[in-house]
Amino acid sequence: MNIINNTVAVAAGATVNVLAGDIFQLLRRPSRVRVGVVKQIAGAADLISARFTIGDAIIAEQAQAKTEINAGGGVDVNTDLNIVGVGNTNDSLGLAITNPAGAARTVTFYVLIEPIA
């Protein structure tokens, strides 16, 4: 099992592929991949979204980030890993986070990679 867990600041109006260059970006074996994305500020105007891909497959498009219940709490692995896909050996993972807001936003993401073969 591999885990990618990080918090990033996404600039206003920007889209960032937060997995680019990560050591676990390429799957080493067939795996189930679960992803959670949470934002650290509430508000309808802050529609932080994520696009998750495995290889050429789009698993989620414009998936809305959840709002943290407790400030600084991060992703709850029991409730927030709501994007799920399956990939093969050497498939590349992509997680592009978009911030349409007028100010930078802090976003936490968690990727759990579970080998299935």
Image (cartoon, rainbow, N blue to C red):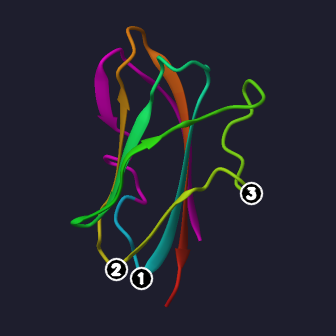
- Disc 3: which residue: 78
Residue nearest the viewer, comparing 14 with 27: 14
Is 49 rendered above or below residue 61? Answer: above
User: Residue 12: horizontal and vertical position, in percent?
Assistant: 35, 14
Q: Is residue 79 magenta?
A: no
The CA distance from mark 3 to mark 1 is 23 Å
Q: Is residue 78 left or right of residue 9?
A: right
> How many numbered dots are placed on residues in this image?
3
Residue lying at the far top in this picture: please name it: 102
Classify mark 3: helix, strand or loop. Answer: loop
Binning the other alpha carbons within 10 Å of mark 2 as few (below 14), some (14 to 19) or many (20 upward) gives some
Which sits earlier in the primary sequence, circle 2 or circle 3? 3
User: Residue 90: horizontal and vertical position, in percent?
Assistant: 29, 74
Kindly identify the amino acid type of the residue bearing the numbered disc 1.
Answer: Pro
Kindly identify the amino acid type of the residue bearing the numbered disc 2.
Answer: Asn
Q: Is label 2 in contact with label 3 (beta carbons under 8 Å)?
A: no
Is 49 rendered above or below residue 56? Answer: above
Question: Which-is-in-front pick, marks 3 and 1?
Answer: 3
Q: Residue at x 34, y 65 (%)?
A: 26
Q: Is label 1 in contact with label 2 (beta carbons under 8 Å)?
A: yes
Quadrant assignment, res 11: top left
